[in-house]
Every structure is written in C-alpha cells, then in structure tokens.
Image (cartoon, rainbow, N blue to C red):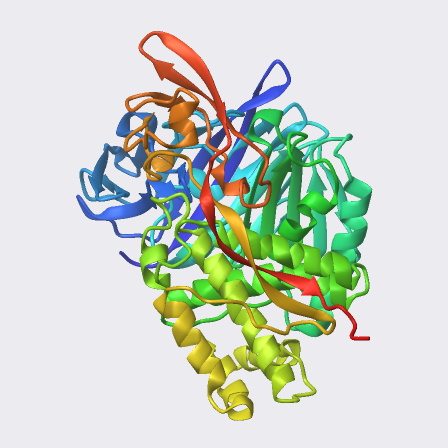
Amino acid sequence: MSSGKVSYLFKPETRDSVMVSIGIHETLTGFSLIQGEAFAQLSKAIAGCLTAYYEASQIRAFDDAGSVTIQVREEADVRYYAFTRDTVGTVHLQYLAPIFDVFSWPNPALSLHARSSGATGFAETFLLHPCGSWDLEIDYISMPGSVSACSLGIGHIEEKNLPDREVKDLCFAFGAIRHYTNGGHLHLLMFEEDLRFIDTITRNMSLYYDYLEAAYPGNTRPYFIFLYRKDKKFKIELTGTATRHCCLMGYGDALVQRYEDIEATLVHELVHNFLVLDDPDEDLNSLFAEGAADYYATMIPYAMGIRGTEETIARLNRQLRSFYSNPWKERSLHEAIACSWTHSYACRVMYGRGLLLMLHLEALLREFHEDRPLQGHLADLMALRRERQVTLEDLLRPIDTLTRGKATQCLHKLVQGGPIAPPADFLDGYQLKEDTVPIEDQGFDDTVAYQSPKIVTGLRPASNGYLAGLRDGDEILGKLDEWYLGSHEDQPAAFDIRRGDEIIPITYLARGAATYSYVYKKTTPSC
C-alpha cells in the first residue's frame, strides 16, 4: 500500500431533534489497493467495548471504475476489511455510525453517546481507516447553532502525517457545546447546561493543568476534556488517552455525589498527557503510565496545597485498599496485563503495582536524604524525551546511583508478582500498619463480564452471588460495575438476569473473605 491522503466528512443525523447517527464519507487518495489486501483493521474489543462490528452490507464503496464490494474477515479478535478487486484511482467509503445511549451489544458504536444537545465519542468506534501514516483531513457538517470539535481542534481540521495509532484515539463532538478554555492549551467542552460541579471542574482543572504544564513543559497541542451527563444506571464512564491529548467523561448521580468523587479521575487523565514513556517493553510502559497517573492524581492536590495531609493520606489509603482487595493482586505484571481485556480484575494490577512503584521511589529518595523529590527526576526524564525516546531504565538509573541500586530491585519485585507492601514511612507523621480488607468476589468466573452474551459460569455455592439467587446459566443483562467496588466497599452489585422467560433483579455485596491490606496511620507522639 502506498502512502496517501485520507479525508473524512462527518454528518450528524437527527430524529425529533435528537442525534441518532453520524454519517461518514471517507475518501482515500494516493493508495494502491489490491484485491484481498486489508486496507483497514479494527480490534473487536477495546477495554471491553466492542468497536468493529460493521458488516460488509453496511458499507458502500466505489472508485473511479465504479462500485467495489467490501470483504470482511476475522482473525482472533481483529476484523479486517478488504476490497474484492484492485482499486482504480480515488476510493470512497460511506457508512453510518449509530449512536446508543445504552449498553447494546454487538454494535460498532458503543462509545458514542447521544444527547439532545449533541453527541460525543471516540473515533476508534467507527473509523475504517487504512493502516500506516498519511495526511489526514477531517471536516464536519454541523447542525445549525452547533459546534463541531475533535482533539485536534475545533471546526474544520487538517492534520499532516498522522500515525495510525493516533487516529484510533481521536475524540470528537458535535452539537450545542459550551466551550471553556483557560486561555492556553486547556479546553473543556460541555453538552449540558446543568452539569453538576462544572464551575469547580473548570476552575480546578485549569489550576492542575497549569501546574503540570509548568512542571513538564513542551506540550504544544491543545488538551480537550469532553464532559456530558450520564444516565444513572451506569453511574460513571470515561476514557482518556495520552496519544490524542484528550479525555471523554460522563458522570451521573448514582455514585458521583460530590466533585471530589471524580477529581482523581480527571487529574489521572491530565497526568497521562505529561508523563509518557517509549519503553519497548509495553508492560513497563503500562506500569509507569498508570502508576504515575494514579500517584499524582493524589499527590498533585497535596503539593499545590489544595488538599491537606490527612485527606491526602485518606485518599492514598483508599487506593491501597482497592489494590489489596483485588483477587489478582499477587499475579505477575505480565500475566495480569496479558489478561487485562478478558478478566475484570486483571487490568487493575498495573494500576496498583504502578502506584506502589511510585511510592517506593519517593520513599527511597527521602531515605537516602536526596533533597530532590521524584517529580524532579521525572521532569529530567520528560526533558530528555524531547531529544530521544526514553525508557523506565532512564528514570531508574540516576535513582539507583543515589540509592545503591534499590530502585531497580524494587521494580523487579513488582514485576515478578507475589505479595509486596508499601514503604513503611512515606509522609512524616504517618507509619504503615497491617490491615485487612474483604476481597472482591462477584461469585462467578470473572471472564463473564467481557463476554457476549454474559452467561454466568463457575458460580461458587458459598458466594454472596449464589446466596442472592444467581445460578449458572443465567444471562446477565446490562453492564457490571465491579470496577468501582474497590472504591465503594458498601456498594452492592446490582443487575438484572434473564432465566428462561423471566427477568430477575439480583443485588448482593460482591465480597468474600478478609484478606491482608495496609494502611497509613498517624503516629502517636511519644510522651
């Protein structure tokens, strides 16, 4: 396939003033496509959201010689799209991206969200783009009185030589959007007039963004946060990305009662866009990225004086309980990441172990009387990244010099798996104590959450799920919320199941026996 140019034209379509679909007209120029050659590929599942369920019959294609038939084939979890003959000249694709406000399965648009004021989502949900790097143009046909935007900018977009991986994370929005900017690179796009805590979000995200931009200068692209109101049923939903410099977030009333309930998530996504590695070991990339984002989501408000020591320690203790309540906590990093899209608890291992890495590095620097905290070493690393690719070894090497190799020793323990504790002394006035936490337990095989349909298997007779009436063979309807149980220990699992012709509500506390945990407690002054 030769290099070329890809142009997209997006046209929102409405019914009764509500956006119901987005028409896509894609034009490929400068490509030589032969019969059977895959011009596009999409993973069938990304983070549990199906993204590649277009059938050949849903796509119209034509070139300078007339219509072209599309062929779709599957290999493992990837769908490949090809033409049944060699193409001639310019190729046009036309297809429709439906918009759903509920978790409907399967369809090619699970991350698109409809509102009377517009729609928002990620481009990976529907773009059948050719693989590689090429010139990209994006244009929107907006509704009257509306705004169109994506994470490359607002309005008509032109981008040159955009890598394939970046297009997969392209965030976009249409509709009557309220636009807030801090006068610099930060932009918040809002779809409702009555979004809760919006004034606090805009004020604090502006402060946090300015802090990060000063700490890690060099970002020149705009950063977009797309915000919308989420149905109570699904509580909270968000996606963030470091490659496209944007975050999509919807939040509702079921769990989100205060701004503080979502601040850590928003700051986590901000951090992703400033702290990035290029390590050839993707496991280490994930460990660093998620660990740094979780760590600084707690520590940046503390460093800025927005949160006091006691509240910071309380947040950190909640993060630790979330990790130690995870039944996958002792798995190796590689094993967990390899299963992270098929096991509901596996993905969280890199977050917890990454957080522990950051805690230990910070504690080591203090132990060896280094007057420069971890953030200073990260600033050096990101400055070096502007000159060349950087790896986790580039971060650990100077810290090893100061700490006699203990930083790398700690990393090896975290990667290998098994039990590992936080550092004994992290903040002055607090010491680590042993604790217990009930382990998370849905009561059945944890791969069920990522299957379609979700049929209960491996149900354990002693589990709370069984005692609540759940049985093997039941079909779980809707979306499971086990992701949040680590942060909301008293929040029950609640969903409907289909058993034969019956629809039965099931509610229970998805918890098992007590397991070990750790907590930081204030030291008692000696007399």
Report x, y in % for residue 479.
Answer: 46, 29
Direction from residue 153 to residue 62 in the image, left or right: left
Residue positioned 62% across, 78% down in the render: 374
Q: Is residue 150 visible?
A: no
The quadrant of the rendering that contains the C terminus is bottom right
Report x, y in % for residue 522.
Answer: 73, 65
The quadrant of the rendering that contains the N terminus is bottom left
Report x, y in % for residue 517.
Answer: 52, 57
Residue positioned 28% across, 47% down in the render: 39
Direction from residue 245 to residue 187 in the image, left or right: right
Direction from residue 18 to residue 100 in the image, left or right: left
Residue positioned 74% across, 43% down in the render: 259
Foreground pick, 449 / 272 = 449
Q: Is residue 203 visible?
A: yes
Foreground pick, 493 / 110 = 493
Residue positioned 69% across, 27% down in the render: 144
Foreground pick, 362 / 510 = 510
| Residue 343: quarter of image | top left
